Image: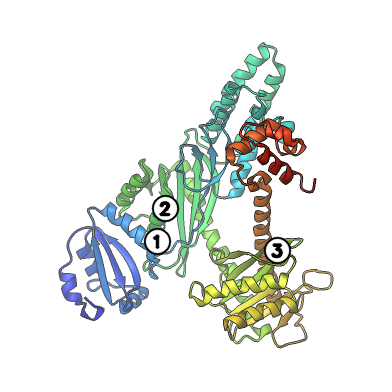
Amino acid sequence: MTETDFDLPSFLAGLPAKPGVYRMLDAEGKVLYVGKARQLRNRVQSYFHGRAHTSKTLVMLGLMSRIEVTVTASATEALLLEANLIKRHRPRYNVQLRDDKSFPYIQLATAHEYPRISFYRGPRSSPNRYFGPYPSSVATRETLLLLQKLFRVRQCEDTFFANRSRPCLQYQIGRCRGPCVRLVSPEEYAQDVADTIRVLDGRNTEVIADLGRRMEAASQALKFEDAARLRDQISMLKHIQAEQTVTRARAEDIDAVAIAGQGGEYCVSVVFVRGGRNLGSSNYFPKGGLGGEEEALAAFLAQYYLARGAPAEILINLSLEDCDVLESALFERSGHSVRIRRNIRGTRARWLAMARTNAELGLSMRASSRATVSEQLDALTRELQLGRPPARIECFDVSHTMGELAVASCVVFGVEGPIKSDYRRFNLRELTPGDDYGGLRQAVERRFTRVLRGESPMPDLLLIDGGPGQLKAALAALDALGVQGLVVVGVAKGADRRAGQERLFLAGQEAPLILAPDSPALRLIQRIRDEAHRFAISGHRRSRESMRRKSPLEEIPGLGPKRRTDLLKAFGGLQGIRQASIEDLAKVHGISRKLAAQVFERMNPGS
């Protein structure tokens, strides 16, 4: 059936009174909206008679060309299907949650004799134990540092741990007990791990009581150093409890979720409570949707928790329909019961009030930031004589160390500020060391090849970190691709590289444009340029660290993981291998004299 054959009255009359999902499509077959329903007939028919609609809904109905439905076995299955379809099609009129980064967790590798505790971000599919989620990587790393000081559980990687012949710096500064060289027994270490788990579970009072008993026993046994260490642990834990402003006696995992809206804009704040402890909050700004705050909050809950699992209890600040359906879907995804509650008292009410306050503050700060960006864009339009404010600005920068491991960055700014999901990095290939011009040309060419393929929108303004040479390289790349009419500006630092002395170079103009140091347009350019510089440096550092972590032994043909491990164990590390002779290397099991000669040559080039 073609779009022109679609008979709406007959379609509506034939809809079943069963649960399912409906999709509204435009004339080109693009999905405009995805919805779920307990009864498809009643829900879809309500769009065409019997109730008033918002202006946004009326616009969508005017664009709609046909409707497709999928009948499901239950309302829960319909909710799960709706979430999958929204994620796949990202319909224009559905609430969209832009969230492409998973939350950080603390991971405990339980299978190891001496378990490692570490920062972790990703799927929780391994048998290890996970604690969190934490609202930010900063909060996670602060918690890890605190645990390291408290219980001295190792955080080093297993490969590092397995090849130690003496304890590392962490042991020297009192943040590890040296399990890599057996300075602590597995039983003592297991006790530290158990204490760490209880603290992460929020059972601080229980840990303090247990540490007190162990301190008394150590003191009576005249083990005064152990008693002093336990005393310090008790003191630190009590200090942590004093700083924790919101606590509960029972260890509970709760999310308090509140939404605030104004003028069609929404902010959803999630306060994380794990083990009865408030770990902080994160704000989200969902877009789109046909209804008000209730619809935006319901869509947020479904998209957010179906993608990552849910705690045992979710507190919300609005009454929503079909909470039972969402609870059933979350039970299927999470494997445990999930309660969604609105009417609460006591500590829960304070957590929810905190979330509501954060949502209102986030909304007001976003509005203030948007006003500032709007003023800066207007000033930039006047200074560069653009005709209209740019809706999308891209900026390129290149970072390297003495010409090595060059990385180019491309950051994107819009009317609301940074669009981080569109940021890109380019590892520059086949580049002469130190050739910044060639690096920029390569990065611009690779970026705009994708733009011309429709993979990314065309920017209204392109900024290049550099002077006339960098500008010329970028323009050459654009000319080679046939990109015309794009305003390109080179942003060069002043004579002593101080902020406020930037010179702007435009194509076709020999003299640079110099803006006043307090110009709003210059502040925006500086912000975008600095962000491109930060993004390039972070990418370069990541590449550099990756190269440093790569062992030179990995570059030797025929030397697999087992033989590398045997060599490292035999000589206590890379330094020992460098000092070994070919004869000593050949004595290691599995290392022939020919392979030993290759190892010696690689570790001692030019010898």
Q: Which residue lies at the image location 60% right of the left edge and 44% below the top edge? A: 558
Q: On the picture, is 77 further left or further right than 12?
A: right
Q: Would you name the residue on which mark 2 appears? A: 307
294 and 431: which is toward the camera: 431
Q: CA distance from mark 1 to mark 3?
A: 35 Å
Estimate the x, y position of residue 205 in percent, counting from the top left.
55, 28
Camera-near label (2 vs 3) is 3
* Label 1 vs 2, first from the N-terminus: 1
**Is 165 above or below relative to 72?**
above
**Residue 399, numbered label:** 3
| Quarter of the image with the C terminus in it | top right
Q: What's the amino acid at mark 3?
A: Ser
State the SS at label 3: strand
Q: Would you name the residue on which mark 1 appears? A: 87
State the SS at label 1: helix
Report which quarter residue 445 is drawn in.
Answer: bottom right
Q: What's the amino acid at mark 2?
A: Ala
523 and 401: which is toward the camera: 401
Q: On the picture, is 246 further left or further right than 38?
A: right
